[in-house]
Image (cartoon, rainbow, N blue to C red):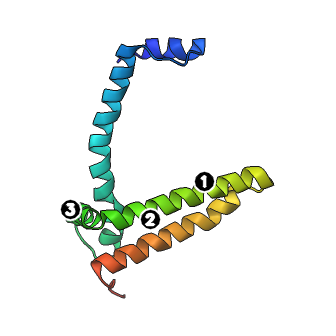
Amino acid sequence: FNLGELTALATKGGTELPPALQEQLERVVRWTSLFFIPLQLASFFAAPLMALHQTPLLKALFFSFVACWRNLGALLVMQLIFALLGILIQLLASVLGLLFGIGLMVLIPVLCATLYSCARDIFGEWPTA
């Protein structure tokens, strides 16, 4: 991977990547995705499992991966809805001159509550103190 070639192309303002560099970038994206997606699935419910069920780290990662895999369709729809809401908030902030942070102050707690609700539905009721 030749970072100097990419930097030179960016400073010239070029839009077309050389074929060799394009192939290298595609390979980097494929390998990164190959490792990132399973890691993201494993860590999605790991924190609530460890905090609320006192599950050890490796078990929490495993259970999170299996739960995400079994509920992949529902989680993809949820992620798509939150991505669209994030875009909508950004558009409203830019068009209406609103502060982008105010929209995020609403979206982030809703996302956390949704994550908690999903985890409770998948793993059952959390133990109370």
Disc 1 packing (10 Å; few <14; some 14–19; many ≥20): few
Q: Are marks 3 and 2 in contact (CB under 8 Å)?
A: no
Q: Is 20 placed above or below 48 here?
A: above
The residue under label 2 is which amino acid type?
Met
Q: Nearer the viewer, mark 3 or mark 1?
A: 1
Q: Can residue 105 be spotted in the picture?
A: yes
Reading the image, the residue beneath label 3 is 62
> Looking at the picture, how far across and down is residue 36, in whole percent?
32, 45
- Relative to 109, is 63 on the left or the right? left
Q: Which residue is mark 2?
A: 78
Q: Are marks 2 and 1 in contact (CB under 8 Å)?
A: no
Q: Which residue is mark 1?
A: 87
Q: Is residue 92 above or below residue 25?
A: below
Question: Gap in Å between the C-alphas at discs 2 and 1?
Answer: 14 Å
How many angstroms separate mark 3 from mark 2 (CA)?
21 Å
- Which amino acid, mark 1? Ile
Circles 3 and 1, Cβ within 8 Å, touching? The answer is no
Q: Check disc 2 and report its element: helix, strand or loop.
A: helix
Q: Nearer the viewer, residue 58 or 17?
A: 17
Give the structural element (helix, strand or loop) at label 1. Answer: helix
Residue 50 placement (x, y as % from top left): 30, 69
Pointer 2 or 1: first along the chain: 2
Callout 3 amino acid: Phe
Q: Horizontal and vertical percent for residue 64?
A: 27, 64
How far across and down, in percent of the image, does residue 3 sit? Answer: 42, 17
